[in-house]
Image: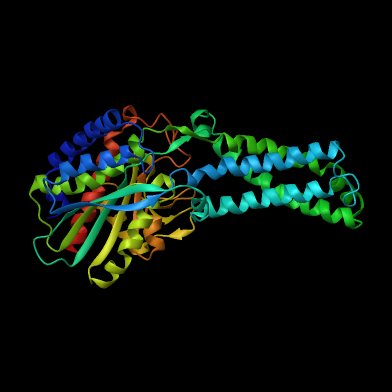
Amino acid sequence: MKFAEFPQAVVKENVNYAVREITNVIKRYGPRESGNDNCYAVQKHLKKEMDTFCDETGFEEYQIAPKAFLLFTKVVSMMTICAVVVSLLLVFLNVFDGVGPNAFFVPQIIVGVAALISICIAVLQLGFYIPFCDMFHKKSTAHNFYAVRKPSGEVKKRLIVSGHVDAAYEWRHLLYSTKVKLMFPLMAWTIGGAIISVVVAILAVIASVTDMGAFGDFMVNYSYYIHLCTALAMVTLFYFVDFSTISPGANDNLTGTYAAVCAIRMLDMAGVELKHTELVAMITDGEEAGLKGTTAWAKAHKDEYAADGVETAVLCVDTLCDLDDFNVYHRDMNSLVKNDEAFSEFVKEAGAEAGYEDMKLASVFMGSSDAAAFSKAGIKSTAIAAMDPSPADYYHNRRDNFDRLNPEAIEAGFKVVLNTILKYDED
């Protein structure tokens, strides 16, 4: 079936259904921290619904350390603050008197090493999503839910539509800066301060043992003031994440969750049978904990997808709210990972045919979508999202509630997903 022939009343009904269900999920199941029982309860709620129009549904377990992804912000900030303040205190207590060429020689080394370790951990965790800190945290069991609808003919293709059910810990930088965007300046101060402190510490140590003239004298005598500024910046990092408060996650990402659910539901309601495409709705957990759910799924199924001869592609849907920023994301994970270019173009064309000609190929320049985990595993993948990248005022905080849902944006996402499915089966 062509998209133009698909009954639009079915799309409208599913948009209304999604809005009702998202509201119900938030009210009924409560905060959905990555890997907690509430996430699993929502997935089981979805299973009951999808059992009625899918050929197969099920769960896959994996291990997760929910707080490990962002808890390092408190550890590295406190480590750097302590390195600066305690070293300064020990200098005034004359503990370092006679140790090294001057009283601040050893403190410079301590602060420089602490700041360097902080930078390295941040790059691993947030830059490349390498779960360095997971080894220090107790793990619990989380689940990925999947629902499969078989085609009428031989399975020659597989299309997975994915959304994550977990919600984020609240980010205070965004909660308290609705009119003035403070997040990027504060993060730049933190990261820039740590980098500058490393450089300054190195220069101060060198200046302590070699003659660098007036510049060297300045480094020896005044560089510690720069470290104090870095310590102040680390205070803002320490308070960045509020682990006691979970965003309701209405837009991020129950809209993506129901895009996956309604992808199959719409076909069933319209009586449409795909010819050769196995359609999979995958509702993951752990995206907000560092893409843990999709990473586990990709690891478990990569060899299967490579060996079964069925062309497989994954369309991840994440946040459908801001139509002015409705795009296909062909670069991901801080722009460091490239999603499949051809499939991204394919989804963009599907969007244009569905009436959204303004969709562009864009880049996730801060953070990541689940598509990056698949792309890193060599599985064809891309992502769509409609969210203000500045970022939106509801992003990762309590304002992301059902009263902020945008049915028009949800409808746009549903139409693009639907036409992608229909085109994928036809082409």
Q: Which quadrant holds residue 221? A: top right
Determine the residue positioned at 36% across, 57% down: 296
Determine the residue positioned at 40% across, 51% down: 291
Q: Position of residue 34 (x, y in %)?
A: 38, 42
Q: In the image, 410: left or right of 275?
A: right
Closer to the camera in the image, 206 or 114: 114
Q: In the image, 193: left or right of 177?
A: right
Q: Position of residue 151 (x, y in %)?
A: 12, 60
> Total marks drawn?
0
Q: Position of residue 254 (x, y in %)?
A: 30, 39
Determine the residue positioned at 78% across, 54% down: 202
Determine the residue positioned at 28% across, 43% down: 257
Q: Is residue 74 above or below residue 301?
A: above
Whether residue 358 can be seen here: no
Whether residue 57 can be seen here: yes
Q: Position of residue 39 (x, y in %)?
A: 31, 40
- Image quarter in which the C terminus is found: bottom left
Q: Which quadrant holds residue 27? A: top left
Closer to the camera in the image, 285 or 268: 285
Identify the colour scheme used.
Answer: rainbow
Closer to the camera in the image, 335 or 396: 396
- Image quarter in which the N terminus is found: bottom left
Closer to the camera in the image, 213 or 110: 110
Q: Is residue 112 above or below residue 21?
A: below
